Amino acid sequence: MNDAQVWTTIGVLASGMYATITLMATMFVRIIKTEIGTVRTEIGGIHTEIGGIKGEIGGIKGEIVGIKGEIVGVKAEIGDLRKEVHGLSRRMDGLDRDVSAISRHLFGIDPA
């Protein structure tokens, strides 16, 4: 081979290598863009799921507030029941006193 042929071969090989590097770089950039798009899509899905979870948490908070209100109502009812039981207890004490007085009167038992 003469000098011109050597330089031509070097030029052809250099341009082939340059073309290969360009092709690989282009393909690499396209792959990276596709993967970034996929990651963005997945992140968007995660944001949607988080929004759904936040909605469910809000619903649970509402249910808890409702339950607290019911508990307050039950406490009030228990307080009312306590008052009624206390009133019945006083009435029973009075009834016991009256029955004792009647039995003393009927059987002629004198209080000491």
Image (spheres, rainbow, N blue to C red):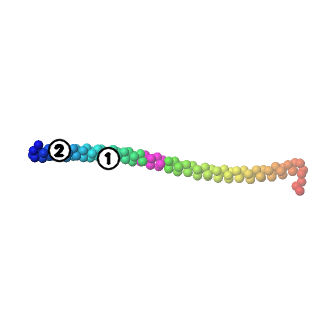
> Front-most of 97 and 63?
63
Numbered mark located on residue 13 in the image? 2
Residue 27: where, in percent of width, then height?
25, 44
Left or right: residue 77 compared with residue 106: left
Span shown in magenta: 51-59
Residue at (61% x, 51% y) in the render: 75
> Front-most of 98 and 65?
65
Left or right: residue 89 compared with residue 5: right
Q: Amino acid at mark 2?
A: Leu
Looking at the figure, which quarter contains the C terminus? bottom right
Left or right: residue 40 compared with residue 26: right
On the question of residue 26 being in view, the answer is: no
> Front-most of 73 and 110?
73
Q: Residue furthest bottom?
A: 112
Q: Amino acid at mark 1?
A: Ile
Q: CA distance from mark 1 to mark 2?
A: 34 Å
On the question of residue 43 being in view, the answer is: yes
Residue 7: where, in percent of width, then height?
12, 47
Q: How many marks?
A: 2
Residue at (61% x, 49% y) in the render: 74
Is 53 in the magenta? yes
Residue at the disc numbered 1: 36
1 or 2: tag closer to the N-terminus: 2
At mark 1, the secondary structure is helix
